[in-house]
Image: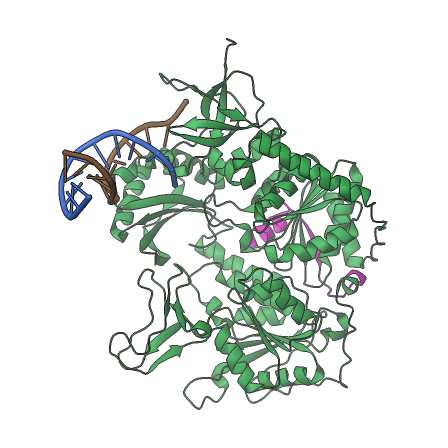
Chain colours: A green, B blue, C brown
DNA sequence: AGCACGCCGACT
DNA sequence: GTCGGCGTGCTC
């Protein structure tokens, strides 16, 4: 019997088990770090990864042998192990939990034989396409660069392996800059690979098509959670073994093993989707920057409205800054867009004359749409309520309709009405399981909770008093579409939101209808404000954006500004239309500084205002936050757990540079009958916060036993909201 | 999380 | 007399 080696193995076990470090197993043969294995854990058999470093051998504990290992999978490289190790440490999760969560789910199930069958299938497919002959597609000659694009590329090249923030207004041609960087990176050496991150799955097919067209001689793969498990494994494997040169994906793609990594691009780097909100709560954008440093490759962060975190770093000189402030349809964009020519404008499209106290026209700005702020309180409202749409906006919509142009109405609330209300007794359609209203969906006459999913038929009469006169309060996209159709019967109105796009392929079909000109007015939630390039759209209106002005969420204002500026970018993407394009804002606070900055298209000025507020309040990026969250049957139980945790913290010397705030209910206090309470931890120093969490959290693992009713607890490092 | 073990109510 | 409720505890 050969002497067995002892291996560290990161196993798939959830965080609250306390099994944070790799466990130790024996193996007859030495297995390289990064090898996928199956090991016995208790009565189960779980997947794991042979880890790096030496095994920690527990005292008086018999080690068990590794059950099986995958020989067909090249071991995960050391830099991948280091990335997972860093992320697990930084975000306070188990190494094995994170490692297995970011690998393709198929790998968990497949054994050597199964993997061999897959590989044979991939090889056969590759052979077939090779026999079909490489399509004689020559790479298209890249479009000529605008001066600002050239300058940005020079700045990025000068920065070398560092991080560059590319601040470019919508329509300034950021994508072309990305493509040139990819081109440059791939030209560096034959094994080179580029990683492109995008915030939403919806945006990958568009970009993938454009990238594939630009690099016909290279293999481009995408990685996101909508792929089928076999597709995802195949694409991941192509990246892992170096066959794919360009990997395009959502946040999970930041964990792709890439032997030839030469460039990382993070598009729309400010987007909140980069922060994983469940399980290991990592920020793919921040990890991308870390990974760029680790591998000494350039990282490009692109946005029209950078996150304040990135903006400050650029101001401090920690990131290079490249700016593109001119909006001009580059040849690439014309090429990429629909073949339809821009409709001719009927004469001098005179701006809608502002009706009494309504719109205030401003001069066009660098090819950006003209902003029109409508003071909803100044409008006459005969029935005690301001109208849904200001008459001036309706007139502007009618003009677009007459000219055959498209309009977009944004309303960030799906469903028909956010709540049903009984005028007689005051009953409202609350969710019995959550601290939230159930939304009225007229389409199937249901009351649906958007948090726990509870759906019931709308009652005929008030459940409390029997009154028949129960009415919807407020307005969602369903109702807005209906009202719009009534106001403009001749318009073809379409609605795009999470409800209308639930079915597979529905979003693509609906977008195609818009692009084909089968839609005059599109009503949608924020999901249509991002990225989509609507060529014939010359009007975008935010129907009711004020909620973001006074939210308790400290990032709400930053997000609203980004959303509105981005939405404005949907209008008049082609230069020919830009002059006639308008962004309308219906507001009750027309003098709010956020709208004033929007009117000037002044990102930098608005950022400065927000940063001053953040500094005064001690909020990021001037401080670093973590949230300790506890879920329990009763709020008091969760609070008691958090208070106990705070008492333990007070005993630690590492707590000195850290502030702990009192436990408070989560903004959405109850979901599916679970009460959620959280405690904010804040420090000026990221390092001090990390050191504190490292000292503190291990001491919390035994606590739930003393606190009945506590279902789970978790820490969220760098939370998006508090 | 799984999956045990473990000690108290309504059934063949 | 058993089947089974989910409380408590462990997993190299």
Seen at 64% across and 61% down, the residue is A531
Is residue A57 visible in the rendered image? The answer is: yes
Q: Is residue A133 left or right of residue C7?
A: right
Q: Residue furthest top?
A: A1
Q: From the image, which quarter does the C terminus of chain A lie in?
A: bottom left
Seen at 49% across and 85% down, the residue is A378
Q: Is residue A280 left or right of residue A18?
A: right
Residue A319: x %, y % from top left:
64, 46
Foreground of the two, A166 or A86: A86
Residue A435 belongs to the span the image colors magenta:
no
Residue A602: x %, y % from top left:
62, 66
Image: magenta residue range: A308-332
Q: Is residue A162 left or right of residue A695?
A: right
Foreground of the two, A184 or A686: A184
Task: Quadrant for residue A406, please give it.
Answer: bottom right
Is residue A529 visible in the rendered image? The answer is: no
Foreground of the two, A680 or A170: A170
Q: Residue furthest bottom?
A: A382
Residue A309 belongs to the span the image colors magenta:
yes
Q: Is residue A623 left or right of residue A77?
A: left
Residue B7: x %, y % from top left:
16, 35
């Amino acid at each position: 019997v050969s002497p067995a080696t002892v291996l560290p193995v990161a196993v798939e076990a959830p965080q609250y088990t306390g099994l944070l470090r790799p466990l130790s197993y024996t193996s007859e043969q030495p297995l390289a770090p990064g090898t996928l294995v199956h090991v016995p854990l208790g009565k189960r058999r779980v997947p794991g990864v042979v880890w790096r470093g030496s095994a920690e051998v527990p005292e008086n504990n018999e080690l068990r042998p590794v059950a099986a290992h995958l020989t067909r999978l090249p071991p995960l490289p050391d830099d991948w192990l280091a990335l997972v190790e860093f992320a697990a440490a930084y975000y306070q999760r188990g190494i094995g939990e994170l490692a297995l969560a970011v690998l393709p789910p198929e790998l968990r199930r497949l054994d050597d034989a199964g993997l061999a069958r897959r590989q044979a299938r991939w090889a056969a497919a590759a052979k077939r396409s090779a026999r079909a002959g490489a399509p004689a597609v020559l790479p298209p000659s890249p479009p000529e660069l605008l001066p600002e694009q050239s300058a940005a590329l020079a700045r990025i090249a000068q920065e070398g392996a560092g991080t560059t923030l590319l601040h470019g207004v919508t329509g300034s041609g950021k994508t072309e800059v990305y493509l040139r960087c990819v081109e440059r990176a791939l030209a560096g050496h034959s094994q080179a690979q580029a990683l492109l991150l995008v915030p939403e799955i919806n945006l990958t097919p568009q970009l993938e098509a454009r990238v594939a067209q630009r690099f016909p001689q290279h293999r481009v793969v995408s990685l996101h959670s909508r792929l089928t498990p076999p597709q995802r494994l195949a694409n991941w494997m192509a990246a892992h073994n170096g066959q794919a040169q360009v990997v395009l994906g959502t946040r999970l793609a930041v964990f792709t093993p890439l032997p030839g990594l030469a460039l990382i691009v993070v598009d729309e780097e400010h987007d909140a989707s980069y922060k994983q909100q469940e399980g290991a709560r990592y920020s793919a954008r921040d990890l991308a920057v870390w990974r760029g440093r680790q591998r000494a490759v350039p990282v490009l962060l692109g946005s029209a409205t950078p996150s304040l975190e990135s903006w400050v770093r650029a101001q401090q000189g920690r990131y290079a800054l490249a700016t593109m402030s001119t909006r001009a349809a580059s040849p690439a964009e014309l090429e990429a867009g629909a073949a339809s020519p821009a409709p001719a404008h009927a004469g001098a499209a005179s701006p809608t004359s502002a009706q009494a106290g309504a719109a205030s026209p401003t001069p066009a700005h660098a090819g950006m749409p003209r902003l029109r702020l409508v003071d909803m309180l100044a409008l006459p409202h005969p029935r005690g309520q301001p109208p849904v749409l200001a008459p001036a906006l309706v007139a502007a919509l009618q003009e677009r309709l007459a000219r055959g142009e498209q309009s977009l109405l944004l309303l960030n609330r799906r469903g028909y009405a956010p709540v049903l209300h009984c005028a007689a007794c005051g009953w409202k359609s609350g969710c019995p399981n959550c601290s939230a209203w159930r939304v009225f969906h007229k389409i199937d006459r249901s009351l649906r909770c958007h948090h726990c999913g509870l759906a019931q038929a709308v009652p005929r009469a008030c459940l409390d008093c029997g009154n028949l006169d129960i009415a919807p309060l407020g307005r969602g996209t369903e109702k807005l579409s209906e009202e719009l159709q009534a106001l403009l019967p001749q318009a073809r109105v379409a609605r795009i939101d999470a409800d209308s796009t639930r079915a597979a392929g529905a979003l693509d079909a609906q977008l195609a209808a818009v692009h084909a000109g089968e839609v005059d007015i599109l009503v949608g939630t924020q999901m249509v404000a991002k990225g989509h390039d609507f060529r014939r759209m010359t009007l975008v209106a935010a129907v009711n954006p004020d909620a973001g002005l006074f939210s308790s969420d400290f990032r709400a204002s930053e997000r609203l500004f980004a959303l509105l500026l981005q939405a404005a970018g949907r209008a008049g993407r082609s230069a020919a239309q830009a002059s006639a394009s308008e962004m309308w804002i219906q507001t009750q606070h027309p003098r709010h500084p956020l709208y004033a900055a929007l009117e000037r298209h002044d990102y930098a000025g608005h950022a400065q205002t927000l940063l001053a507020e953040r500094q005064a309040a001690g909020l990021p990026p001037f401080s670093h936050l973590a949230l300790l969250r506890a879920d329990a049957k009763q709020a008091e139980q969760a609070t008691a757990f958090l208070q106990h945790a705070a008492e333990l913290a007070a005993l630690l010397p590492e707590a000195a540079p850290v502030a702990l705030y009192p436990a408070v209910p989560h903004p959405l206090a109850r979901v599916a009958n679970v009460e959620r309470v959280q405690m904010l931890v804040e420090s000026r120093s990221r390092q001090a916060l990390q050191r504190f969490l490292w000292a503190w959290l291990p001491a919390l693992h035994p606590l739930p036993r003393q606190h009945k009713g506590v279902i789970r607890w978790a820490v969220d490092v760098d939370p998006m909201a508090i």
